[in-house]
């Protein structure tokens, strides 16, 4: 073989080896770049979701504040209505004909406390709150149980 042929073959083999090494290096380096690009895309998607959630939370709280304000206004209106009604009722005279209760029934109800307070006993006998309830007048002390 000629030396010139060997040089050409060596140059072609070196070129092919360089192309192979370059393609392998590009593949290895590009895999990291693809992974980085995928992570960036995922990060951008998550940021969009977070921004959407923040705006929905802001909308929710602004709506909640509006509802609370309307509730406060309604309660103020209710209080004003109650005050006007109380003033109107206070201006009416207290002694209206036909609504007077018989005083004999009121005096009878307040005179007998037995009608007001419940009792724990019937007439003539002691109840469960009496001091003698449940006590027997046995003279012998109770015996301890036998096993």
Image (cartoon, rainbow, N blue to C red):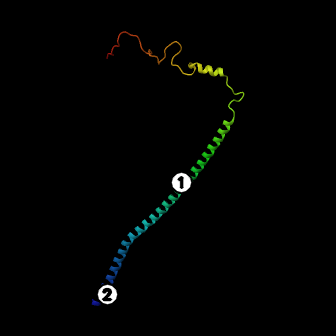
* Numbered mark located on residue 61 in the image: 1
Farthest residue, direction right = 97
Residue at image point 61% right, 48% down: 73
Q: Can you say which quadrant of the picture contains the N terminus?
A: bottom left
How far across and how far down the image is residue 49, in percent?
49, 60
Q: Earlier in the sequence, mark 2 or mark 1?
A: 2
Q: In which image quadrant can residue 136 be found?
A: top left
Q: Position of residue 144 (x, y in %)?
A: 33, 15
Taking depth in this image into account, of 79 and 59 the one nearest to the observer is 79
Which percent across, then down, holds residue 138?
39, 10
| Along the viewing direction, whichever of 93 and 102 lies nearer the viewer | 93
18 relative to 142, above or below:
below
Is 96 above or below relative to 47?
above
4 vs 31: above or below? below
Density class for disc 2 (Cα within 10 Å; few <14, some 14-19, many ≥20) is: few
Q: Tell me what residue is drawn at x 34 percent, y 82 percent.
A: 15
Of badges 2 and 1, nearer the viewer stands 1
Residue identified by numbered label 2: 8
């Amino acid at each position: 073989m000629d030396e010139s042929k060997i040089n050409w073959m060596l140059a072609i083999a070196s070129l092919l080896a360089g192309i192979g090494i370059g393609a392998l290096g590009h593949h290895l380096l590009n895999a990291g770049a693809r992974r980085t690009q995928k992570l960036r895309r995922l990060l951008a998607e998550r940021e969009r979701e977070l921004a959407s959630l923040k705006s929905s939370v802001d909308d929710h709280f602004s709506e909640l504040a509006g509802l609370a304000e309307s509730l406060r206004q309604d309660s103020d209106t209710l209080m004003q209505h109650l005050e006007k009604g109380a003033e109107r009722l206070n201006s009416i005279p207290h002694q209206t004909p036909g609504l007077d209760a018989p005083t004999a029934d009121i005096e009878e109800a307040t005179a007998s406390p037995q009608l007001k307070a419940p009792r724990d006993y019937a007439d003539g006998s002691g109840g469960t709150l009496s001091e003698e309830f449940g006590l027997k007048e046995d003279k012998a002390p109770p015996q301890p149980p036998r096993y």
